[in-house]
Image (cartoon, helix red, strand yellow):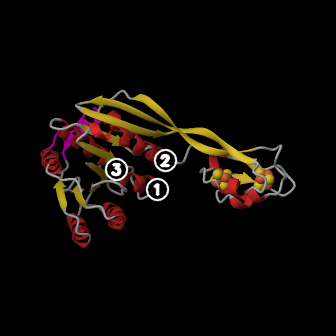
Amino acid sequence: MKIAITGGKGGTGKSTIATALAVELGKRYNILLVDMDADCPNDHLILNINRKLIHNVEQRIPEVNLGKCIKCGACGTACKTNAIVSIKGSNPIFMPSQCNGCGACTIKCPVNAIGWNKKEIGYIYSGENYGVSLLSGELKVNESLSEMVVNNMKKAIEEKKKNYDFIICDTAAGTHCDVISALEDCDFVFAVTEPTPLGAHDLELILRLLNKLKIPTNIILNIADIGNKKIIEDISKKYKAKIIAELAYDKKILEAYSKGLPIKNQEINKLADYVAGMVPR
Ligand code: SF4
Ligand code: SF4
């Protein structure tokens, strides 16, 4: 069964909760934790895991054969990300950092002068500690296609999933392509938030997305005793997403976090029992 910890807003404690839940469930089940926050992975730091590289993530990029090019300028007009500057009568100029590998330029070229090459854009690591197996994706510095790293992690999950009872995906913040890709084939989602106007705003965005994806969702309310809980309760009713756990502000959680240790908390234990009782869709 594949579940995701997400939440819209950054800094609400998604990774802290995902790692704690994985460790608690790991006492009873085989757990694969997947850190899908490719821009800023940190589950390995919380679980004190020395990651090992298992493979590189590559993106296809076009390569112009200037010997065949007739300098027509068509590839430049086809490229919506301005990765090719191509003026009629001049050789096209290619900027790999702007390219998303869509292939429009290769289709548009009238003389098949554009072939394919590859560039490295990220890495996938694995590791293990506290009875939890970890997959962790990381985007290379100065690259932008984090969803491509997430898509590669999903392939790695497919190869490994038969060995695990639960796969827990810890997504990035926000509602962008990388988060959508991480969520789209999950059986169940927990949206972590905090009782603040920012938390409420971003929770509503992620619940709207999850409604569209038709994935059942519960809410985990972090630092539940600080701020205005009612704004989250109103959103919970509006989207029929139950508040399943409430973690109060606790200095011990911050101390564990600052030492790179998974947190221990009664609400996490209850959450693990709830997950253990789930039946796959
Ligand atoms: S593959 Fe797509 S993004 Fe890259 S240069 Fe060609 S048209 Fe532009
Ligand atoms: S579309 Fe093909 S032929 Fe035309 S400028 Fe681009 S690479 Fe050259």
Q: CA distance from mark 2 to mark 3?
A: 19 Å
Query: Which residue lies most toward the bottom here?
Result: 238
Q: Quadrant of residue 125?
A: top left
Relative to 87, say whether 51 is above or below. above
Q: Give x and y (percent) for residue 188.
A: 26, 55
Across and down, in percent, residue 149 comes to: 47, 44
Q: Amino acid at mark 1?
A: Cys
In the picture of the structure, the residue carrying the numbered disc 1 is 177
Which numbered circle lies on residue 11? 3
Q: Which badge, 2 or 3, is on the more N-terminal residue?
A: 3
Q: Identify the mark nearer the N-term, 1 or 2.
A: 2
> Residue 147 versus residue 71: which sits nearer the camera?
71
Residue designated by label 2: 146
Say the numbered circle drawn on residue 196: none
Question: Left of 19 or right of it: where is 36?
Answer: right
Give the residues drawn in magenta, as a range: 250-265
Respond yes or no on whether mark 2 lies under 8 Å from ligand 1.
no
Where's residue 266, x and y in %? Answer: 12, 45
- Residue type of the residue flagged with mark 2: Ser
Q: Residue at coordinates 13% horizontally, 44% vertically from top-left?
A: 269
Depth-wise, is mark 3 or mark 1 nearer the camera? 1
- Assess whether residue 70 is covered by the magenta stretch: no
Residue flagged by tag 3: what amino acid is it? Gly
